[in-house]
Structure formats: structure tokens, C-alpha cells
Image: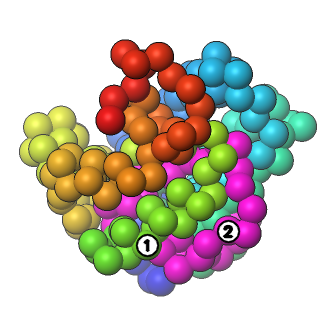
Amino acid sequence: MTRFDRAYYKRFYGKDGAHDEQRIAHLATAVHSMCAWWGVDVATVLDVGAGMGMWRDWYNTNHPAITVRSIDVSEHACETWNHELRNIAEWKPRGKYDLVICHSVLQYLDNTSFIKAIENLASATRCVLYLEIPTKWDYENIVDSRGTDLQVYKRSAAWYRKQLQPYFTQVGAGLWTPVDGLPMYQLEASR
Ligand SMILES: C[S@@+](CC[C@H](N)C(=O)[O-])C[C@H]1O[C@@H](n2cnc3c(N)ncnc32)[C@H](O)[C@@H]1O
């Protein structure tokens, strides 16, 4: 896949880009702490569409005992940042991972591929999924167009929720748990 080449990462992850190591450190600290709050002792992490590998690197630095597997569909990303070459729309991991991260990836997938990817993510998630996908509304109202790739699928939050609902319960701030997974207080989660 040539779209996610050297120029892509230089353009969207340079100065004023989507996010950087420091911002990922804040987010990863929060996600990992929420897992701990819910009693999840994270031992395995799967990072889907890992890009520059910022999540993997944060885990390796801060929690070296945790096993992190990172995959990406981009040959350039895999060669440069050492991931496995996989397309999440076509690849179902054999095992499960305590925490699955899919950060700003699925807006690149068409509807059919998205539906397959969610099936694969559901199959891979034992406890918690961190999922960020900007919606059509987000692109129109929040996203800074200067540092963001806008050549993506722009779908409604309602459409995304409909696809996720059979597999996941939303617990806020991008976190989802498998249906019938972790017990949550009613006002912690929405279905
Ligand atoms: C916007 S970047 C996000 C990178 C990283 N998750 C982050 O937040 O820093 C999108 C990444 O998703 C990857 N990607 C896109 N489609 C994919 C697919 N079907 N399977 C796996 N990775 C994919 C791209 O190669 C790219 O590295």
C-alpha cells in the first residue's frame, strides 16, 4: 500500500501534526490507569495501525514487562518502525489481548472493510479497546484541517455505534469493553 509512505508520515506527524510522543504519553498513562482502576492487569497489548509506534514505545519504556504486538498495513511503517505487516480488515489474530489500541486508523477503511475490522478487533479484545475514529461531525467542527489527513471516510457517530454495538459497550473517552465483559456501574457505561 503506497498511500502510507514516507511523505504521509512526514506530513501528518511533523510539526503541528496529529499528535506526538508527549501527547501519547498523557493518553497512554490515562488508558493504562483506567485499566488498572477496572482491575485489568494488562499483560498483553495489540496496537493496530501502529504508525510510528508511539504507543508501543511508551509501553516498552514505562512497562517493559508488558508484551506489545504492533501491526500496520503500511510497508514503510513496518520497515521503519518495526511492526508486523497486517491489514486489520483481513487478519484475525489467533489469541486475545488485554488491551487493544486502534488509534486513528478505521476512518481509512471503506464500510465493508470497517465491518470486517470491527469483527477482528472484537475477536482480539479480552478486556479493553481504545478506539479513536473522527466522525463526519468531528471533521466539520473540531478537527484541525491543517494537520489532519482529510482523504478519509466521513461517517456519522450513529453509523459507527451501530457497527460497534453488537460487540462492545462504550465506557467513555474512547474506551470500549466487550459486551458481557468487565462489570461496569450503569452510569460508567452506555449501551
Ligand atoms: C493516522 S495513522 C495513525 C498511526 C498511529 N495509530 C497513531 O495514532 O499514531 C493511520 C495508520 O493506520 C494504518 N492503517 C490504515 N489502514 C490499515 C489497515 N487496514 N490495517 C492496519 N493498519 C492500517 C496506516 O498505515 C497508518 O500507519
Relative side of 9 to 150, left or right: right
Q: Position of residue 106 (x, y in %)?
A: 38, 61
- Asked if residue 10 can be seen in this view, the reply is no
Label 2 – label 1 distance at C-alpha: 13 Å
Q: Which residues are magenta?
A: 82-108
Residue at figure coordinates x 31%, y 58% from the top left: 163
Q: Position of residue 156 (x, y in %)?
A: 16, 52
- Asked whether residue 94 is drawn in magenta, I would say yes
Relative side of 174 to 57, left or right: left
Query: Which amino acid, by three-letter code, is at mark 1?
Result: Lys
Query: Which amino acid, by three-letter code, is at mark 2?
Result: Pro
Residue in front for this viewpoint, 55 or 42: 42
Q: Position of residue 169 (x, y in %)?
A: 42, 39
Indicate which disc residue 116 carries. 1
Q: Determine crowd level at label 2: few under 14, some 14-19, many 20+ residues with C-alpha closer than 10 A.
A: some
Residue at figure coordinates x 61%, y 72% from the top left: 92
Of marks 2 and 1, which one's residue comes earlier in the chain?
2
Residue at figure coordinates x 48%, y 74% from the top left: 89
Residue at figure coordinates x 73%, y 69% from the top left: 94
The residue labelled by disc 2 is: 93
- Above or below, 101 against 87 in this view is above
Q: Position of residue 145 (x, y in %)?
A: 19, 47
